[in-house]
């Protein structure tokens, strides 16, 4: 894995880019509130950022085919952090929303490109561990950047945070220059594939192959939207004394658990040679985590149970993240690697934003326990979808390039099938089999080959030949 060309520069570049993003994620809304905007405008800064992210992710696969990974990632790393310097000009509404949207463009292109690039650079037998290691680098940068941005803002103001974030993004852009200059594989017509199973996969609609793993990610990312928004506050409300100490660390605890178990899931997938082994266990563990959060808050149990719940939820979410991405890579042909990355990121980011909004509305009516309870129900829906997909996948007949279905529709092929059955019946009787071949071969324009002994210049006419 480590010897793959460009793998290490990619990890360093992604870690720096996500570090820049993590520095600004909690700081921009806080700066908006400090500038006199209401909570709606502060939330709009994040909403505009995510809207630009999702919109950019839709078009990134085409850019990767036309321009290549190197220029797209350099551009995205630059756009992710450097526009933050625009906030030094002021925090009027247009300024706040414009530069947030520009940063969202960079984030959208980067998230699609980095996952697809890993699949291009690393051999398939190491892909699970490689995507897990990508999650480790992202997780470490987030664990450092999220509290660091708030600490710098508290000590020196918001301006230094903007400058540090821009400088970190420039480091990422420089590291992206060391990425191999390759382009995403072009779209290939199904007839160009060498093997029938590849042609069958290429002809099946993409959404049919990726919908279930995408929904598995979304069901947990919606719950993550509630966890990231309300878990620290819930810890503080449950136990003001202890919550003041561990409330700010809850997201780091959840993120650290996610990082570790995402890598473990990748290792298991590589050992088994195929993804999906830890998908349902990860969903179940994630359900237990978010359900435990609802029970602890509703029954006012010890705040330390929320720490346990955060570890469970983060671990399950990490496993599902890696498994869903690997399943998409595994199901789609190589020419659609960038589409797989785009779908995964779109469902992840859209689920996080939608979860924050929908479960936030639930929390306003039914408190934090109600929000986490609904989140647990969403995860159950994802589990049922995965179970149904496994059962159907084990029993269904492929819609295209299915030999049995085609033979039933072609009269000549039906006669060929009957002849094949007759061959199998007489295969155990060599005399009848030889008579059958001798009688039918001339009608098919085929004659049995006649072996003639060949004599090399070094061999004499009496030398045995093979």
Image (cartoon, rainbow, N blue to C red):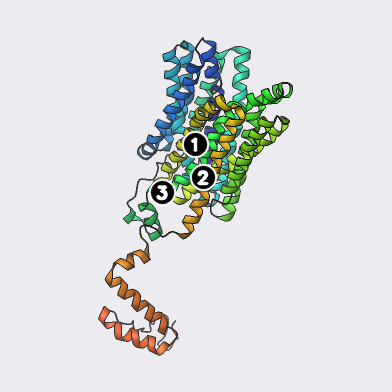
Q: Which residue is mark 3?
A: 208
Left or right, residue 19 beside residue 250: left
Pinpoint residue 106: horizontal percent, then vertical percent.
Answer: 44, 28
Q: Is residue 374 above or below residue 432?
A: above
Q: CA distance from mark 1 to mark 3?
A: 18 Å
As helix, strand or loop, the secondary structure at mark 1 comes to helix
Question: Residue 359's mark?
Answer: none
In percent of the image, x 44 and y 40: which residue is there? 343
Specify the quadrant of the image occupied by residue 397. bottom left
Q: Quadrant of the C terminus?
A: bottom left
Q: Residue at x 34, y 84 (%)?
A: 437
Q: Is residue 44 left or right of residue 440?
A: right
| Residue situated in front as seen by the camera: 280 or 27 | 280
The numbered dot on residue 324 is 2
* Residue 163 point in image, percent of width and height: 53, 17
For disc 1, the neighbor class at 10 Å (few under 14, some 14 to 19, many from 20) is many
Discs 2, 3 touching: Cβ within 8 Å: no
Q: Secondary structure at mark 2?
A: helix
Proximity of marks 1 and 3: CB atoms separated by less than 8 Å: no
Q: Decide which of tag 2 and tag 3 comes sooner along the chain.
A: 3
Disc 1 target residue: 348
Q: Measured from the top left, where is residue 449 in percent x and y?
A: 33, 81
């Amino acid at each position: 894995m480590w010897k793959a060309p460009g793998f290490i520069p990619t990890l360093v570049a992604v870690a720096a880019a996500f570090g820049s993003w993590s520095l600004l994620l909690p700081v921009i809304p806080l700066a908006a509130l400090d500038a006199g905007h209401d909570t709606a405008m502060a939330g709009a800064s994040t909403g505009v950022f995510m809207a630009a992210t999702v919109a950019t992710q839709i078009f990134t696969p085409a850019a990767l085919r036309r321009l290549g990974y190197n220029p797209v990632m350099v551009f995205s790393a630059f756009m992710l952090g450097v526009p933050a310097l625009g906030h030094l000009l002021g925090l009027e509404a247009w300024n706040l929303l414009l530069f947030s949207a520009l940063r969202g463009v960079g984030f959208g292109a980067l998230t699609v490109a980095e996952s697809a690039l890993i699949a291009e650079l690393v051999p398939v037998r190491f892909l699970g561990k490689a995507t897990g290691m990508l999650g480790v680098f992202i997780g470490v940068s987030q664990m450092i950047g999220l509290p660091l941005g708030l600490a710098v803002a508290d000590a020196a103001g918001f301006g230094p945070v903007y400058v540090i974030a821009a400088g970190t993004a420039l480091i990422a852009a420089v590291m992206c220059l060391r990425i191999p200059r390759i382009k995403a594989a072009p779209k290939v017509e199904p007839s160009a594939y060498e093997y029938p199973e590849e042609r069958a996969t290429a002809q099946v609609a993409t959404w049919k192959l990726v919908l279930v793993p995408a929904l598995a990610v979304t069901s947990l990312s919606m719950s993550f939207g509630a966890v990231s928004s309300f878990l620290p506050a819930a810890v503080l409300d449950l136990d003001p004394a202890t919550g003041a100490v561990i409330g700010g660390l809850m997201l780091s605890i959840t993120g650290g658990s996610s990082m570790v178990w995402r890598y473990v899931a990748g290792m298991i997938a590589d050992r088994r040679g195929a993804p999906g082994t830890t998908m349902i266990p990860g969903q179940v563990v994630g359900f237990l985590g978010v359900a435990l959060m609802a029970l602890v808050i509703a029954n006012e149990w010890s705040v330390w149970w929320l720490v346990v719940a955060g570890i469970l939820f983060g671990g399950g979410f990490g496993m599902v993240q890696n498994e869903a991405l690997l399943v998409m890579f595994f199901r789609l042909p190589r020419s659609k690697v960038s589409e797989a990355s785009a779908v995964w990121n779109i469902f992840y980011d859209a689920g996080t934003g939608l979860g924050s909004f929908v479960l936030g509305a639930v929390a306003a009516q039914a408190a934090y326990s109600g929000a986490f309870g609904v989140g647990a129900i969403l995860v159950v829906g994802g589990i049922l979808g995965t179970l149904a997909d496994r059962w159907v996948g084990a029993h269904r007949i492929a819609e295209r390039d299915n030999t049995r279905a085609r033979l039933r529709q072609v009269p000549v092929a039906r006669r060929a099938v009957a002849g094949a059955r007759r061959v199998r019946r007489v295969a155990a009787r060599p005399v009848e089999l030889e008579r059958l071949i001798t009688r039918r071969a001339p009608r098919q324009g085929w004659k049995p080959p006649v072996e003639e002994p060949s004599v090399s210049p070094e061999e004499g006419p009496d030398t045995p030949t093979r």
